[in-house]
Every structure is written in structure tokens, then in C-alpha cells.
Amino acid sequence: MGCGFYLDVRDGRIVGVIPSKSNSVSKGNLCVKGWHAHEPVQHPDRLKKPLIKENGKFLEVSWERALDYTAKRLKEIKDKYGPDSLAVCTSARCTNEENFVMMKFARAVLGTNNVDHCARTCHVPTVSGLNQSFGSGASTNSYDELPQMDCILIIGSNPTEAHPIVGWRVRTAIDNGAQVIVCDPRKILLAESARFYIQHYPGSDIALINAMINYIVANNLHDKEFIHTRTEGFNELWEMVKDYTPESVKDITGVEPELLKQAAKLYATSKKSCIMYSLGITEHTVGTDNVISMANLAMITGHVGKEFSGVYPMRGQNNVQGSCDMGALPNVYSGYQPVTDEQARKRFETAWAVRLPSKPGLTLTDMMAKAIEGVLKCFYIIGEDQVRTDPNTHMIEKALKSLEFLVIQEIFLSETAKLADVILPGASFAEKDGTFTCAERRFQRVRKAIEPIAGKTDGEIICELSNRLGYQMEPDPKKVCDEMASLTPIYAGVSFERLEENGLQWPVPAKNHPGTPVVHLGKFKRGLGKFIPVKHRPPAEVPDREYPFILSTGRTLFHYNTGTMTRRVTNLLREFPRNFVQINSADAENLGIKRRQKVRVKTRRGELTV
């Protein structure tokens, strides 16, 4: 989320965390994970030496040998099978500069657009959906506006646990008189404070939102002036949503029509209304359509393109926004400049003095499929544990084992790293300089507190590999930031010097530009906001007799994602020692399940005991 803190360093070791009162995001506050952020950095499990697998076992080797061997194998595979036989997965935990360097490495050195990262399975629908509707795939407004809202519609998001600093702002808004609408199949903590709690069926988000739009327009609650002057496609949208009455969607959503109407009226008629969503909206087979429906609702009421309004996607990791911004995607360069755009491509070709591929690369999910097919031969993964985080673990393992060469750059020996041919020990946030970009589009500085435990930063590792492959790259983060700004119009005014205080919110198109807290003021980036009709489609898999339940994943206050870092923090592990599954009490009674009893959870793809 962009929370700020100082690290207390004594005799070369980090001994504590001190919240930054001047930080624009956290304002001197930290969640429980933030207070313990330093502990995994110096954990004894940290990888400290490069490893090469020989005869099924890892051997510690020197940096020289590891980098020489890795460069040799990358070149051999590229020469034998072509550049598109290689792929790169960057990391949302790396800095903007490291993501930019890795994106450049894939395209300019390996010669492929096969570059992606974890946003593919979390917030790429945000990038795609909001870009289609607004012309920009990011949050429209700033966190500081939240406490002054009149109405906050929260759907598919659990901010008090997943994004506590934003959850604190929502609580402040409630204390200030804001009315909250919570839409979630699971009764989250904020539902207790909500004016309306809508417990809709999983996978029915589009039907729910379309019905709200239907009610708003049918009852003359839409913003006609905004629609007329700022948008296009209203007639097409209305023609489609006419059939989505609150009554007609009851069987799809499970929501009483009167409750839906009251919530829609509150959102539409409040002067300052916004929408907040997260992975409960994006992590669906219809994730992009879900996001588009959020944009449709915001535009139909005129609650976007102005202060105290907007659409807030809550990102999943500290630099998911920045990784996308830096072009760690198979179809765009930094600043979302399409690789198919000849003018943009020529700008990068001129700067990098190399011919670049014009065809979009493979997505992360496609990479796995192509590995199994034998098309993809080599995968270079930085700071991601696909075996534990991506859907269908058995398929991921099969894909990675099918490769001729797997390079993992990590700080711990993850389940994915165990499958590697080479492991290059990376650096944590505390061991590097650079920038991160949080969900409100804010570039912020991160500063090195201690020297890299394994001797090199992630950027240095990438650049040393590039140099061995005959293409000189500069790892200095300040110079990389300057290069990125020179090639990316919406970041043209970004520099380390300008980010020393509280950062800047992009777009920052010039060196004297103050940043943009609210985007789409006056007009959308694409000109007119576009209403895009989206229909409800059932989930790809629905309950049946063999598998009658829906498993929905979520987050807890004490742990972060798979717990690779937070489960190495004693206090957090003490508070939350193991994962659990929740089930409706009626279903539990029918199955004879008791509280704290271990159960076997089985899907078509695997099973676990929890």
C-alpha cells in the first residue's frame, strides 16, 4: 500500500522499525505486518550463496561460476530454439527500476516479449478493464479522500485485514458519518459497520452491478449531464441492462430486490461516492468484465473524474502497480505503451540500439501451458513462488519440470526454487535503492539500510548477466529511473531528486509537474469514458453433486500471501500458527464437522488437510 517506515540499524543489523509520520500513505501508522517487516530480512533461512543443481542436489558455487553458467545456458537455448523459447517472470516485490531492467533484459537481450509477473493472476483485469473504460488501468483517486466520503461501496475486498492502512481510513470515514455498502459472499468485519450488507452468491458480481445500474437509470438517478458530456456508449449499455432488474437477478445473486435497490440508491444519490474492490473481483474467469462493470457503475452516476469519488482497486503486493507500470507485461512497454505501436517501439529501439520484437509475448498462464507442450524451454523467475501461489499446483510443477533450464532468483528456498537448475540469491527491500509505486499511483523512494546479504541486488544480477551476453546494462537505480522517465511520457517528470519527500502520483508529464492526485479531471485519458456492456456469465466451474461447495480464498491480518516471509516472524506465527477453512454452520452440521476439527478439502485438481 506504500506505507512508510525507517529501519533502525545498529552494527550493520536491523533491530527495529520506526513508522514515518511524514509518509503520505501511512501517516505514522503501521499494521502488525509492518511492525515486523524487518525480521524476515535477516532470517537464518536466507539464501546467501548461488546454487547450481548437479545430479539432483544443490551445490554452493561462486557468483562468477553461477552467472557464467546461467549466461551460457541462456545463450545456448536462444541459439538452438529461438528467442521465444525463453520467458521471464519479474516480481511485484522488486523495485520499479529492477522491473524495468528485467523487462529490458527480456526484450533487448533475450529478444522476446515473453515477460509477465504475478498481476496476471491478480490485477491484470484491472489494467485491462479500467484501460478499456477510462483509458488508464489504475486507481482514479487518492487514499486521503476516503475519510471524507459520504458513501463507500466495498465489493470483493476486505480492507481491514488485507489492506489495514486503507481499512483504517474507511473506519475514519464511518466515524465521520460515511455510509458503507459491503458486497461480499463472506461476512467480513466491515459488514458489521455497513449501512447495507449484500451477501451475494460467488461469481454473480456482474448481475449484481448490472441490476444496480438498471435501478439507477430506471428511477432517473443517473447523472445525465456527465453521461452526455463525458461518456459514450450509454444507449448500448442501457439496451443490455434493461433485462437486469433487481427482481430478475434474485436467483442469480441471492439478493433480495429491495436491499439491492436501497444500496443502489444510496450510492447514486450520495454526493461523494466511491467504489473499492480487490481480488474478489479480479480473480475470476470473468475478472476483466467484473472490473468493467465497476467502471460502468461509476460513470452512470458521475462518481469518477472528480475529487471525492472514483474507483479504488486494492492491489495485492507492494509493487504490483509499479511492475505493471514498468512494462512487466507481454504486450506493453513502460507506461502501457503497446509493443505493437510502431512509434513507441521505435522510441525504445533507438534508445536501446537494438531491434525489438513486435508481437506480444506469452502471458504467465500461457507460459506454463507452452512449457508442458515443449515450446517453452527456459524460464527465469524472480521473487515469485508459482508452485504455492498459482492455481493448479500439479500443473505448475509439471510445467516447470518440463523445462530444459529453470533459473530462480529468490531470497528463500521456496517450493518453486527447489525445482530450479540455478538459484541466484536476491536481495530484500532493505538491501537496495529504488522506487515502488503503490495502488494510488504514488512513486516513492526506498533506500538501502544494509548491504545485500548475498552480495548483490537483483538489478546488479540482471545487469551482470546481460553484460555476459554481450549487451551492456547499467544497474545504478538512479540512472535506470532517469532512463525510464526519458522513454515514458506519463513519467517524464519523475526523478530520485523529486521523490525524496512524499513521492509523486503519476501522471507526471514534466519536471515541474506536481503530480496527479485525481485522474480523468475534465476528460478521460481516452477522451470519452466508454460504457461497455458486459453480461453475467456463470463461473467456469459451478457446484455439482460430486463437488457441491465453492472454495473462496482470502487473507488474514497476520500473514502476507503464502507466508514465505511472515511465517518466519515469531510473533505473527504465534498469533496465527496455521491456516484454516471456514464453512457455513448449516453445512458443517450436515457433514458432522466440529469446530477446530481437521478436514480434507478436495478439488478436481488436488486436495489438502487443514
Image: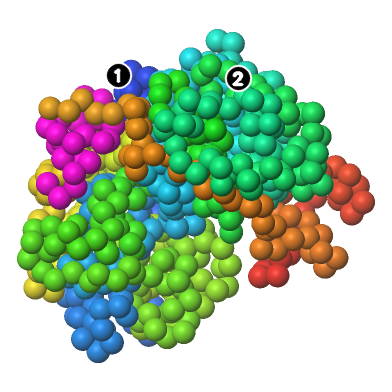
| Of the pair 224 and 488, the residue shown nearer to us | 224
Residue drawn at (38%, 70%) of the image: 362
Give the spatial CA distance, label 2 vs label 1.
Answer: 35 Å
Whichever of labels 2 and 1 marks the residue nearer the N terminus, that label is: 1
The region drawn magenta spans 486-511
Say which mark, if any, is on residue 419: none
SS type, badge 2: helix
Q: Secondary structure at mark 1?
A: loop
In the displayed structure, 174 sits above or below 603; it is: above
What residue sits right under mark 1 in the picture?
Answer: 22
Residue depicted at x 45% and y 58%: 120
Residue 457 in picture, x, y percent from top left: 21, 53
Residue 269: which numbered mark, if any?
2
Task: Measuring from the top left, give residue 539's x and y in whole percent.
Answer: 67, 58
Give yes or no for residue 491 being in the magenta stretch. Answer: yes
Q: Is residue 51 visible?
A: no
Evaluate whether residue 313 shows in this view: yes
Sort mark 2 into few (<14), some (14-19) or many (20+) by Cα contacts within 10 Å. Answer: some
Q: Quadrant of the C terminus?
A: bottom right
Horizontally, is 44 left or right of 281 in the view?
left
- The residue lying toward the viewer, choosing from 389 and 195, is 195
